[in-house]
Image: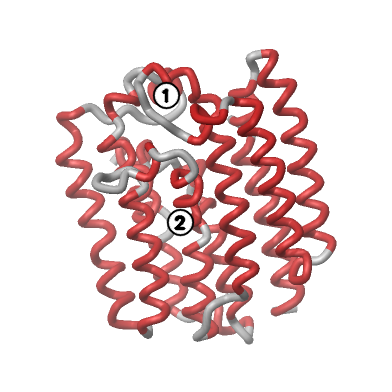
């Protein structure tokens, strides 16, 4: 169990659970609906099981790269080849019951949103697509972090959320992914792994992140108002600070604080949605 928790990256759980509760809050029409047992049960899925799917599949296929990356041994998890089969069975055992349950409980559109999440989660790391080794496709696939919100919204509202919000979320997660690849440039190049950051280099990748964060803020402004603009400005400042950190060799220190920064941003967005829809 200790290995499962470490592989699932508990500090990153809110990247899936956060969009789920935001999508749910945006989709429901009555606060009482939030206590629907189906919503509560599927919320549990986006804690350990779904995160184990995303990061466990990644670790199964990334050993040759991860063993060259000090971050994996010190900050995350290094899954040795002899642990892969056991991890695979745990991933299957914890995910399949929720997938089967969702297929039986919800309509085709809602289940398709969950299937899209599962597809993107698996083939980001797994052959034959292995999107993480293809610059730009690697960042685009990170819209998988938006899909729990799309799924929750469909589940509660019976329809898709506004397209511009899905696009804004996709741009934000693409920026998040591209930024996370910057501290790994040297180890990824040493392992022969091509990513958006190894292709563009650190400086250009950070500029791209800046553009993506600002575009996401602009696309969501009609729905989130001043919150969207304020967060866009905050991330712009963080990207500017990242230029300095990159030159002083301290980019990983700033990157390691991003879970807290992103959690704060998600909390603000949740309350904006809750104030508009539920209070």
Q: Which residue is drawn at 49% across and 25% down?
A: 184
Numbered badge on residue 144: 2
User: Is 27 located above or below residue 116 in the figure?
Assistant: below
Rendered location of residue 178, percent (x, y): 55, 38
Which quadrant holds residue 205? Answer: top right
User: Is 259 located above or below residue 44 in the figure?
Assistant: above
Numbered badge on residue 188: 1
Q: Number of marks in the image?
A: 2
10 Å neighbourhood of mark 1: few (<14), some, or many (≥20)? many
Display colour scheme:
secondary structure
Q: Of the residues under marks 2 and 1, which one precedes in the sequence?
A: 2
Rendered location of residue 146, percent (x, y): 52, 60
Which quadrant holds residue 26? Answer: bottom right
Which element carries disc 2, helix, strand or loop?
helix
Comparing 194 with 8, the one in front is: 194
- The residues tagged by marks 2 and 1 sit, at their Cα atoms, a distance apart of 22 Å
Q: Residue at x 45, y 44 (%)?
A: 138
10 Å neighbourhood of mark 2: few (<14), some, or many (≥20)? many
Numbered badge on residue 146: none
Q: In this view, does 142 lie to the left or right of 167?
A: left
Q: Which residue is drawn at 61% across and 53% down?
A: 171
User: Is 28 located above or below residue 41 in the figure?
Assistant: below
Q: Residue at x 20, y 46 (%)?
A: 88
Which element carries disc 1, helix, strand or loop?
helix
Query: The C terminus lies in which quarter of the figure?
Result: bottom right
Comparing 135 with 97, the one in front is: 135
Q: Is residue 138 left or right of residue 257?
A: left
């Amino acid at each position: 169990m200790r290995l499962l928790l470490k592989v699932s990256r508990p500090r990153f759980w809110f990247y899936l659970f956060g969009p789920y509760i935001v999508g749910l809050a945006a989709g429901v029409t009555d606060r009482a609906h939030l206590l629907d047992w189906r919503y509560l049960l599927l919320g549990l899925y986006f804690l350990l099981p779904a995160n184990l799917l995303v990061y466990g599949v990644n670790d199964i296929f990334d050993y040759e790269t991860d063993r060259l990356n000090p971050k994996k041994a010190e900050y995350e998890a290094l899954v040795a080849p002899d642990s892969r089969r056991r991890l695979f069975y745990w991933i299957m055992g914890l995910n399949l019951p929720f997938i089967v349950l969702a297929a039986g409980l919800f309509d085709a559109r809602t289940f398709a949103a969950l299937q899209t999440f599962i597809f993107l989660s698996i083939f980001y790391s797994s052959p034959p697509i292995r999107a993480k080794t293809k610059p730009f496709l690697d960042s685009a696939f990170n819209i998988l972090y938006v899909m729990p919100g799309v799924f929750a919204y469909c589940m509660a509202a019976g329809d898709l959320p506004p397209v511009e919000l899905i696009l804004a979320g996709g741009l934000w997660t693409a920026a998040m992914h591209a930024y996370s690849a910057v501290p790994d440039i040297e180890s990824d190049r040493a392992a022969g792994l091509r990513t958006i950051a190894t292709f563009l280099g650190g400086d250009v990748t950070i500029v791209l992140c800046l553009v993506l964060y600002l575009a996401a803020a602009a696309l969501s402004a009609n729905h989130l108002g001043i919150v969207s603009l304020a967060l866009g400005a905050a991330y712009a400042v963080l990207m500017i600070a990242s230029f300095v950190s990159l030159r002083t060799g301290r980019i990983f220190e700033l990157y390691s604080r991003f879970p807290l920064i992103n959690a704060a941003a998600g909390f603000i967005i949740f309350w904006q949605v809750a104030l508009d829809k539920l209070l």
